[in-house]
Amino acid sequence: MSETRRVLVTGAGGYVGAALVVDLQRRGFRVVGYGHSANFPALRARTDGAAELVEGDLTDARALERAVRGADAVVHAASFAGERSCRRDMPGAVRSIVRGTRHVVDAIAAGGTARLVHLSTYAVYSTFRERPMPLEESAELTPDDLYGTLKAEAEWEASRIPAVILRLTNVFGRGSGLVLKTDVLGHFTRAIREGKPLKMNAGGRQGIEFVHVDDVCRVIAELLERPRPTDPLALNVGVGRATSIRELAALFQRVAREELGRDVAIASEESGELWPDRWVSIDRLRALFPWYPAKSLADGVRELLTAVH
C-alpha cells in the first residue's frame, strides 16, 4: 500500500461510487463515502460497517471541506448520469456537475494534501459529430450535448490542480450489486428477468463502447498507489472498440441459454435515431497498466444474468 490510506469517494450511493467504496475498502483503504443516503444501509452491509458514510450534497461547500479534511485522496464520482438526467433537471445538473466539482477542487486546494481522481466521460469529445476514431486524449474537446458540455466544464475545474481525469466510456457490470443501471444492459437484464424479448432500435446497428466496472475500480486503486502527478493527466478508460447493440443482444441471448436455460427472443425495429459509433484509444492507459482491460463484455453479462437468481 502506498502513502494513500484514507480515500473520500463522492457519489458513494451511485452505481460507480458504491462499487468504488466496496472495492477500495476490500483492498485495504480506509474509505469515506460522501453522497445521498438512500443506498447507505445496504452499502454498510456490503462493507461490514467498515466504510464511513457521510450524507451530504456537492453544493454544500462547508460539508465537503469537512469530509475532505484528513483524506489522502478524493475520487470524485458524483455526477448526474447522462443526457436524459441532465435534461430532466438542467439547473440541478449545472449545480451538481460544475459547481460541485468546483467545491471539491476548492476543498482539496484548501487542505493542500489530498490528490484528486476525477471521473469524466468520453462525451466531452462529442456525441453526434463525425470525428476520426479512435478518440485520443489529445483530441479537442467539442461536446455537442448538455451532459458532455457540463462534464467538459467540470474537467476544466478539476484541472486547476494536478488531477487525474478519467474519461469513462459506458461502464457496465454488477459492481456493488446495489444499482442496476437503466442503460441498454439494464434493459436487457430486466427483459430476461421478466421473460420479455430483447428490443433493439434501428436494427441494432448502433455501436457503443463498454468498460467493466471492476476494471474501472482497479485502475483507480492502482492510480492511488502511484506517485501523484505534478500536472493534470487525462486518461481514456474504455476497451478500444465499439460493440453493436445487435452483437450485445446476441451475447445476452447466448448467455441466457447457457447459464439460465432460457431461450430469449430478439425484437428488432428499423426506427430509431443513430449517431456515429465512437470508441477511444487506450494506449496511454495500457502504457501505465499492461494488464488492462481484464474483464470482458461476456464476463459482465454473465454476472448480471446469474445475479438475477
Image (cartoon, rainbow, N blue to C red):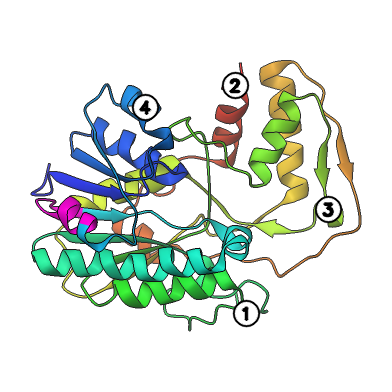
- Residue 282, located in which quarter of the rendered image? bottom left
Q: Nearer the viewer, mark 2 or mark 1?
A: 2
Q: Amino acid at mark 2?
A: Thr
The amino acid type found where label 4 is placed reads Pro
Mark 3 Cα shell of 10 Å, populated few (<14), some (14-19), many (≥20): some
First in sequence: mark 3 or mark 1? 1
Could you tell me which residue is drawn at 15 percent across and 69 percent down?
109
Mark 3 to mark 2 CA distance (whole Å): 26 Å
Tell me how far mark 4 sits from mark 2, CA to CA: 24 Å
Sequence-first tag of 1 and 4:
4
First-in-chain label (3 vs 4):
4
- Residue at the spot 33% in from the left edge and 44% down from the top edge: 218
Q: Residue 131's spot in the image, x, y percent?
A: 62, 79
Please state which of the two labelled residues, at mark 1 or mark 4, is closer to the viewer. Answer: 4
Compare marks 4 and 2 and give the one earlier in the sequence. 4
Q: Is residue 71 magenta?
A: yes
> Element under label 4?
helix
Q: Which residues are magenta?
A: 63-73
Residue toward you, 263 or 294 = 263
> Taking 262 as reference, is 232 left or right?
left
Q: Which mark is residue 296?
A: none
Query: Disc 2 or 1, which lies upstream in sequence?
Result: 1
Question: For the C terminus, which image quadrant?
Answer: top right
Residue marked by disc 2? 306
Residue drawn at x 13%, y 51% as measured from the top left? 71
Measure the C-alpha gap from mark 1 to mark 4: 44 Å
* Amino acid type, label 1: Arg
Is the residue under label 1 in contact with that under label 2 (CB below 8 Å)?
no
Q: Which residue is mark 3?
A: 201
- Residue underneath mark 1: 131
